[in-house]
């Protein structure tokens, strides 16, 4: 097994990266796993800024939409 260089890890992954681990017999490979939530959050924030919409406005619109759906279902 390869040893780690002094002063750090030989892995290119950052400390907060997710890893996939799959055990096959005596082998335990690790591969980086891309998380979707941070990317989606950044895209959603960018869209909000482009449209000039605040979180408070989105939440207000959500409550109105929920009320509308409840009214439709009760008819």
Image: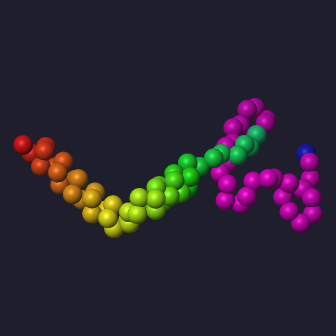
Residue 54: image quadrant is bottom left
Instruction: Determine whether 70 is above or below 57 in the image.
Output: above
Q: What residue appears at the point 13 percent right and 43 percent down from the top-left corner?
A: 73
Quarter the C terminus occupies? top left
Instruction: Judge by depth and name the residue closer to the eye, 38 or 9.
Output: 38
Locate residue 23, reporting x and y percent: 71, 37
Is 39 left or right of 62, judged from the image as shown? right
Note whether residue 41 is visible: no
Instruction: Determine whether 75 is above or below 68 in the image.
Output: above
Q: What residue appears at the point 90 percent right and 56 percent down from the top-left corner?
A: 4
Majority secondary structure of magenta residues: loop
Q: What residue appears at the point 27 percent right and 63 percent down from the top-left corner?
A: 60
> In the rendered structure, does residue 48 fall within the stretch colored magenta?
no
Instruction: Judge by depth and name the residue closer to the eye, 47 or 25.
Output: 47
Locate residue 16, reporting x and y percent: 67, 59
Instruction: Judge by depth and name the residue closer to the eye, 48 or 63.
Output: 48
Q: How is the image coloured?
A: rainbow
Note whether residue 9 is visible: yes
> In the rendered structure, does residue 5 fall within the stretch colored magenta?
yes
- Which region shows up in magenta? 2-28
Instruction: Determine whether 54 is above or below 35 in the image.
Output: below
Instruction: Determine whether 49 is above or below 73 in the image.
Output: below
């Amino acid at each position: 097994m390869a040893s780690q260089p002094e002063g750090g890890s030989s892995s290119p992954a950052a400390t907060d990266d997710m890893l996939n681990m799959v055990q096959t017999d005596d082998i335990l490979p690790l591969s980086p796993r891309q998380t979707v939530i941070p990317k989606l959050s950044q895209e959603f924030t960018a869209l909000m800024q482009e449209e000039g919409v605040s979180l408070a406005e989105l939440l207000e619109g959500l409550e109105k939409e929920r009320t509308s759906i409840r009214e439709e279902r009760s008819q």
